[in-house]
Image: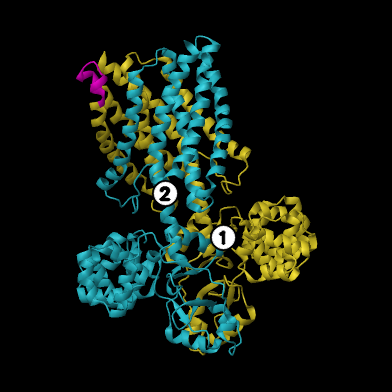
Chain colours: A yellow, B cyan
Amino acid sequence: MVTANPILIPELRLFLAEGDTVGLREVAEELHPATVAEFSEGLDDREIWQLLDTVPVERQAEIFPYYSMFRQVQLVKSADRVHLGKLLEWMAADNRDDLLRELEPDLVEEILPLVAKAERHDIRMLLSCPENSAGALMTTEYASLPADITAGEAVTRLRTQAPNSESIYYIYVLDSERKLVGFVSLRDLILAKPMAMVSELMQRDVITVRVEEPREQVVQKLARFDFLAIPVVDDRNRLVGIVTHDDVLDAVRQDATDDAQRIAAIAPLGESYLEAAILSMTWKRGVWLTILFATAAVTAMVLARSPIEHVWLVAFIPLVIASGGNSGNQSATLVITALSTGDCQLADWPRILKRECVLGVLLGSLLAVPGYLLALIYAPSPAAATVIPLTILGVVMLGTLVGSVLPLLFRSIGLDPALMSNPFVSAIVDVVGIVLYMLIAIVVLD
Amino acid sequence: MVTANPILIPELRLFLAEGDTVGLREVAEELHPATVAEFSEGLDDREIWQLLDTVPVERQAEIFPYYSMFRQVQLVKSADRVHLGKLLEWMAADNRDDLLRELEPDLVEEILPLVAKAERHDIRMLLSCPENSAGALMTTEYASLPADITAGEAVTRLRTQAPNSESIYYIYVLDSERKLVGFVSLRDLILAKPMAMVSELMQRDVITVRVEEPREQVVQKLARFDFLAIPVVDDRNRLVGIVTHDDVLDAVRQDATDDAQRIAAIAPLGESYLEAAILSMTWKRGVWLTILFATAAVTAMVLARSPIEHVWLVAFIPLVIASGGNSGNQSATLVITALSTGDCQLADWPRILKRECVLGVLLGSLLAVPGYLLALIYAPSPAAATVIPLTILGVVMLGTLVGSVLPLLFRSIGLDPALMSNPFVSAIVDVVGIVLYMLIAIVVLD
């Protein structure tokens, strides 16, 4: 997906008005497909189809996935059904799958019969994979060979398969049941003696992912081994597809943005910030603001029920709450990012909690010192002023503990830690923090 | 970098004790280099060198970069200097550059004379590139060819260059002055007729990055065009290196974690959560907690100077502050992630501010309703209760405005928006929010 670039729009419109198919074809044929999409995104749907129709459907299928998803859906709706079937046949399987997941199921059922049978089978298989699984990220286009041919023969066969540029560089070696027995890189084939057997050249120790594995693990494996692609197998070790480096990069970038938005209590926009509709954004932010508001309302009700009696203590309410909230927010973010990058596993919980408890004491003590100095200015006596450092120490320890426990807890029951942690951390830390403040004040002052 | 896996440690220690070099060599030779590092990270430095010394230095150079950076530095310190020079010669240029940047400059100057002259030149060039630039991310190992040879000759030349697996798939076509005139993929060479000229096969419209371009832009270009690698050129369009897909993936994952940590007011750990030293983590969190504490102290001082006189209003302090803080946090995160993914540019500021102002009104009105209902319970009269919804509307509008303006402001003066925004957003929103609360209370109630 690319951002629209309006710079060529006037020229394209001129070509369209003059019916200059040669000029249009030159644009659609010569530039990188991403650039074609970028320059033409600003045209209306009919105009884009006029531009695309100047080039063969293979080329159209290369350009099409680079339009924004919203635009792709619009273009599909205004397209001739038969032409659409052809276009889908030529599109890379992973891009096609992304698009079909966005369409109304009825529309998909209407289009599918127009797609060639072999492709239709692949489409149904990919659509049946759960979102966020390896299966949903993979493409069914890959190069495969048997083990009992020579490197020279292998290169000849690859020439006839002529797979797309994504998938020719790793070639998977399958047995007669399509089980994965090894892989060989195009580099190894080129550098090998032409008479060497594929079975000698291939690496047998293949790192794979299962079709139902979560995409986080696909990302971790591909990143760890610096692969161009990672093979996806079913439960009987039969090759069903590959996940390529570019789709992993897109997934990582999307996940990072989604996670950052979830941590800040925003339901992920899933689209470009400037393109998101105002009402949808209001909803995605408003729903969490309302939940956070409800937790703050509980704090207000607690505070209203047993008011803090000494006026100078009121001034410190925001400071006490902020200390707990900030340290809890730090802990939650650290644990969430460590879980999602694979730095930590759920099983590491005893070490995580131990670390956070130690840090809670250290950070709480660190903040208690300026807290005491500040309190000395406003408190009636140095003894009374100790309420503030004691409370700060307590809420910071509480913050680090709650901030680290909740993401682990949500992960352990299968919920997304990034989504759930923020409102609960602030709810617990704020309410318990205020109660702690009042209790310490009563004990010290009365 | 991989996480340590202790499962093979007892077996490796047994091999080491028995001096079983055959067993050790089998481990170091047969597994994926990342797996070798993963399984042996738990050994001590001397034991790791014993393991590595069972295989040729070329293989050692493949395994070495997969140890954690901390470990690599330790291993360098305990290594024989001459051997180290050889190891550095064989290491991929980008990994070597990462390592040398972590070492003391004195140590680097001691080692460099032991590295072959050609490599030494590359090292000095890479080390001179600013961190976070395309130059610091690139490797100087790439395949290049002249334009006036045939595809068959090209493949033969590649066989003799035998570049590593990273860089053989895109071949860059250079003129006599090493200027980049085109590129051709290994796929195109294999599929072409052997007598076709490289100059006919190559694409002339090459997308490049300049050596000093920030790495964010490298990531955006490579992701947009789905490249395996992107060429890096100097100011005269001479090829100086390439940035490969795996380094971009690592950079994106690291940047995403760093950004999430910065947004949560933590100086990026730059290492695994469980491996970070407690004291370093205390510092990286403590420094920002202290800054946030200072901003909360200002709020406390404002509140102490002109105390809120009506007791029921005190109960609403945390709620009012939280509403502003949460909406400001949302806006800041959205703008920061949009800027860092390239969704928005600085030049989009009028559209961003317009969106956030509209959202401030919508979200503020949304929260004002439950705020008014809650206030009715505690306020002496329905008229007095209007203080709460009016303040909420005000602070939410303030939050969205400050949360969106500050990241744009910091970006425009060249500071990292993720690093700077959080403490300033909370400082401004909290203090101004409290003042606004008091002002509205005075106007409505007195």
| Residue A250 % position (x, y) | 53, 58
Residue A227 screen position, x and y as percent:
47, 68
Q: Quadrant of residue B123?
A: bottom left
Q: Quadrant of residue B90?
A: bottom left
**Screen quadrant of the N terminus of chain A:** bottom right
Residue at x-position 39% and y-position 73%: B140
Position of the C terminus of chain A by quadrant: top left
| Residue at 56 percent of width and 46 percent of height | A273
The foreground one among B424 and B284 is: B424
> Is residue A188 depicted above or below A260 in this figure?
below
Q: Amino acid at mark 1?
A: Val
Q: Which residue is mark 1?
A: A211
- Please give the range of residues in magenta: A374-386
Q: How far across and how far down the image is residue A392, in percent?
A: 30, 29
* Label 1 to label 2: alpha-carbon separation: 31 Å
Q: Is residue B224 magenta?
A: no
Q: Nearer the viewer, residue B445 or A59?
A: B445
